[in-house]
Image: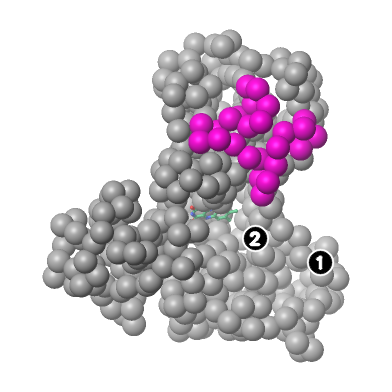
Amino acid sequence: MSHIVIVGGGVAAGKAAETLRKDGFAGDVTIVAAEPHPPYQRPPLSKGYLAGEEGLDAAVLHPAPWYADRDIELRISTTATRLDPVAHRLETDGGMLAYDAVLVATGASPRVLPLEGHDLQGVQTLRRLEDSDTLAAELREGGRRLVVIGSGWIGMEVAATARTLGNEVTVLERDPVPLALAVGPVMGEVFRRLHIENGVDLRTRVQVERIVGHGRAAGVVVDGETVPADLVLIGVGAVPNTALAEAAGITLDNGILTDASLRTSAPDVYAAGDAANAYHPVIQRHLRSEHWDNARRAGAVAARVMMGADAVHDGIPYFYTDQFDLGMELSGYPPLMKDAELLIRGDVEGREFIAWWVDDGRVVGGMNVNVGGVQKAIKELIRTGDRVDGGALTDTDVPVDSL
Ligand code: FAD
């Protein structure tokens, strides 16, 4: 294998390039990244970077010279426009590349809300560094009125950061509780209370109708009432960037479909990260995860497979968030957690607890809230799939690593 091309500028792309060189790949490596930055990770964009507590270095995986030092060609501000799996060629807006293997790590884009007025100035989504910069320019001043449409992770994180920076924040959500799709209604309630106690005007079961006005005089019409806004953030999920793969005739289904080794339906074309819907060998179904840890691990696995190793992407999905004084980590298989029983160890009111998702006596998910040092043990419980006594799971006197 002499030339590996990586399309993408997120953590999956960066980690793939890093792994190729770390594991001794001596051929050519080219990264084709549409954004004007070396591959970077997005979690800080709604948290520390947005708040001004962390700089660009917290987001960027490695600075540009790191790639040059390792003989990795980094083509930033370059978009891959056409992939020809038969000819093994990738066309970009900066020229054509011949490849032996290509990794499609094109990520995801914010879902567009079919709303009147959402292209107005002052209304935005958050995916790129520049989006975070635009929000930061306003929010770091304090005293702004931010309206967030959608209470997913990004909406809730920005709401927390904006509030902490001294802004008035309203969150508008169609469901009865925030984050219900991600953590279920009981845990969603924990986040609802957290935000309300910190002064966020969190309105659930509401229907956003349209956005009116311009810039500082904007407003969001919800159930007939206009909520005034200096800026509006739409955070209603993301859709995988599949256009390049689709045009190449590669099989899609909620993203780019891959096997457990991240091979797509086209020879020598691999996919990883938010764009990929990879077969998970443990739960024996496809799983598209939109989390940093998944993208990171998948990038590394794809690199090894492209080098000829027999690697599979079989980790347990993991996610973390920080909002106000709440630090949370969540490990588990979302499809199995949906109908599982919820058991609690610790103090939910005091926001210091572990929630367990248990299916037929087996832990399929675990979420530690303001409890540190337990993730490894939680993952181990999930990984082994051993039956665990519910009494021990909920008993704070039984150490988690002895379960
Ligand atoms: P991306 O990071 O989306 O990168 C894909 C890149 O490919 C982009 O730069 C894009 O421009 C480029 N690209 C697309 N098409 C082309 C093309 N044709 N040619 C060239 N380049 C192309 N996850 C967590 O687990 N915890 C968190 O706290 C967390 N916080 C987040 C906060 C924010 C604001 C956002 C947006 C996401 C957050 N996530 C978090 C999710 C996490 O960032 C994503 O799962 C991760 O970015 C996925 O990485 P990726 O490499 O697959 O794709």
Residue shown at the point (77%, 32%) measured from the top left = 249
Residue shown at the point (73%, 22%) measured from the top left = 85
Label 1, residues with CA under 10 Å away: few <14, some 14-19, many ≥20: few
Query: Where, by quadrant of the figure, is residue 88 drawn?
Result: top right
Q: Which residue is mark 1?
A: 114
Query: Where, by quadrant of the figure, is residue 27 drawn?
Result: top right
Where is residue 320? Give x, y as percent: 43, 57
In-image side of 46 versus 134 (left or right): left
- Is residue 338 rendered magenta in the image? no
Where is residue 311? Give x, y as percent: 44, 28
| Residue 160 in the image: above or below residue 298 | below
Label 2, residues with CA under 10 Å away: few <14, some 14-19, many ≥20: some
In-image side of 401 versus 144 (left or right): left
Query: Where, by quadrant of the figure, is residue 149 drawn?
Result: bottom right
Question: Which one is in front, 346 or 17?
Answer: 346
| Bounds of the magenta segment | 246-270
Q: Which residue is mark 2?
A: 237
Q: Which mark is residue 234?
A: none
Please count the marks in the image: 2
Residue shown at the point (47%, 52%) measured from the top left = 54
Where is residue 209? Give x, y as percent: 79, 79
Main SS category, magenta section = loop
| Residue 246 in the image: above or below residue 269 | below
| Residue 315 in the image: above or below residue 308 | below
Of helix, strand and loop, which one carries label 2? loop
